[in-house]
Amino acid sequence: MSLALGAPALWLGWVPLQQPLDTWPAWAHSLTLSPPQGLRQDGWRWWTCAWLHGSAAHLAGNMLALLAIAALGQQARVRWPAAAAWALAWPLTHLALAGQAVPQIYVGASGVLHAGVAILGTHHLLSAAPDARRTLGTLLLGGLALKVFMENPWQHPLVNAADSAITVAPWAHFTGSMVGGVLGLIASWRPHRRRLTPPTSD
């Protein structure tokens, strides 16, 4: 999953996000997502928009975050249900943006990365593992919730980020966190197994 998200992003690089869309290369235009159009656009855009970034700093920051998520997942030996949840969260995070007036154009992997952190945190928190793993899960989910709350996507749908020279869409961070949290709960659910006691005789 990390390779599917990171390799194409590194290959495609970044697009001139601050320039008019009609000045972009045709191939880049065909991969972007337009939230206001909702479902009235090519279906592949729900995936491909995560491969494009608005600047070198934007790309580098997301790739570093992706490496951290991949390392934590590898260290915890995350199993296939969590990986499948992250794969499903990829398009669902962007579908949750459908119909919004802003941003007009959305690119970047940050929403999917927030979903990955939520899934990883839920996996650690609910796993039958040592307390240290559950503590890490609590820290991941708590830090994610605090970050989203501080960004206040309900009142600030777009924020200028001087460090990466782009306009950030905090609502994508919120949708990614919510989608990832729900899918993480589903992936971490384990049916309760009753202990079978051997028959006894008097």
Image (cartoon, grey):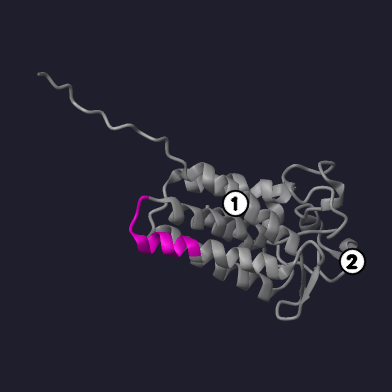
x, y percent for residue 36: 86, 51
Other residues around mark 1 within 10 Å, as few (<14) / some (14–19) / many (≥20): many
In the rendered image, residue 23, in percent from the top left (x then y), is placed at 88, 65
Question: Disc 2 marks which amino acid?
Answer: Pro
Give the farthest residue toward the left.
202
In percent of the image, x 58 and y 51: which residue is there?
181
Q: Residue at x 81, y 61 (%)?
A: 25
Instruction: Give the number of the mark in front: 1 or 2.
Output: 1
| Image vertical order of residue 91 relative to residue 10, above or below | above
Residue 155 sits in which quadrant?
A: bottom right
User: Would you say the magenta stretch is mainly helix, strand or loop?
Assistant: helix
**Labels 1 & 2 near each other (Cβ < 8 A):** no
Res 57 quadrant in image: bottom right
Question: Please, is residue 178 above or below residue 88 in the view?
Answer: below
- Give the residue pinned by disc 1: 180
Residues packed near mark 2 inside 10 Å, few (<14), some (14 to 19) or many (20 plus): few
Q: Which contiguous range is marked in magenta?
A: 128-138
Position of residue 114 in the picture relative to residue 150 (left or right):
left
Relative to the observer, which residue lies in front, 47 or 168?
168
The circle drawn on residue 20 is 2
**Residue 201 at x, y = what percent?**
11, 19
Q: Could you say whether the residue bearing mark 2 is in a helix, strand or loop?
A: loop
- Residue at 61 percent of width and 72 percent of height: 61
| Res 142 seen here | yes
Secondary element under disc 1, as helix, strand or loop, is helix
* Frontmost residue, 71 versus 127: 127
The amino acid sitting under disc 1 is Gly
Which residue lies at the image location 88% right of the left edge and 55% below the top edge?
Answer: 101
Q: Position of residue 179 (x, y in %)?
A: 64, 49
